[in-house]
Image (cartoon, rainbow, N blue to C red):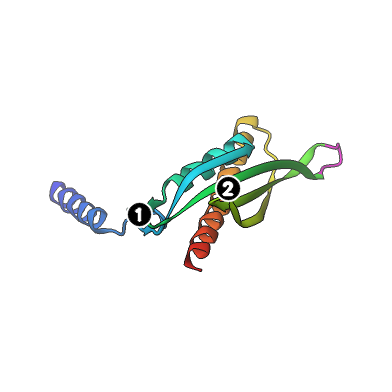
Amino acid sequence: MNKICTKLSIFFLVIGLSSCSYKPIFLEKSYDFEIVKINLEGEKKINRIIRNKLKLIRSNGDKDKNKYIINIKSYKKKEIVSKDTKGDPLKFEINILVEYEVVSDGNLLLSKKIENSNIYNNDTDQFKLEQTEDLILENLTASVSDNVISSIINLDDN
């Protein structure tokens, strides 16, 4: 019995050490541009997530790289989508809107709006409901910030 446990432990250790590792898409690559400044307005949670994602971008150290200023305005709206017969909410919708501009040397290079939304069920446990909302907000914002980064990369490729 002890030999089997030892062999199983070694097997799982080897599998665990040799498995694939997760790496964020934008972390490892260096880019030919630098984000000099990020101006944020609006929803604090959304702005924090976007700022943290944009800070992951690394420049390759080239002195001739493009320097960008990013202006971001974010909005969040939570609405009741459906109610039960008593009038209590059954489903909610979180909608986020992010407007951003990319500026270089005082020239506006890109201005865009991105909107994401998600519908979710109400929960009688208020703590679980808040956790669900935070997770949904984080996922929606991560998707938006990936779109912002991609558009900056595409702008730099042109």
Q: Amino acid at mark 2?
A: Thr
In the rendered view, does 69 fall on the left or right side of 108? Answer: left
Q: Residue furthest bottom?
A: 158
Q: Amino acid at mark 1?
A: Lys
* Mark 2, residue position: 141
Dot label at residue 93 = none
Q: Residue at x 36, y 58 (%)?
A: 29
Mark 2 or 1, nearer chain start: 1
As helix, strand or loop, the secondary structure at mark 2 comes to helix
Q: Residue at x 63, y 38 (%)?
A: 41
Q: Provide the residue span drawn in magenta.
A: 83-87
In the rendered view, does 133 fall on the left or right side of 60? Answer: right
Depth check, mark 2 against mark 1: the one in front is: 1
In the rendered view, does 99 fall on the left or right side of 62? Answer: right
Q: Nearer the viewer, residue 62 or 122?
A: 62
In percent of width and height, residue 44 lies at 60, 35
Q: Nearer the viewer, residue 81 or 107?
A: 107
Establish if 12 lies above or below 156: above
Q: Nearer the viewer, residue 118 or 45?
A: 45
Q: Residue at x 38, y 51 (%)?
A: 58
In percent of width and height, residue 26 lies at 41, 55
In percent of width and height, residue 150 lies at 51, 60
* Mark 1, residue position: 63
Q: Splitting the image into 4 quarters, where does residue 125 fall?
A: top right
Q: Residue at x 35, y 54 (%)?
A: 63
For the residues marked 2 and 1, what is the alpha-carbon distance in whole angstroms?
32 Å
Tag 2 near tag 1, CB within 8 Å? no
- Secondary structure mostly taken by the magenta-highlighted segment of the chain: loop
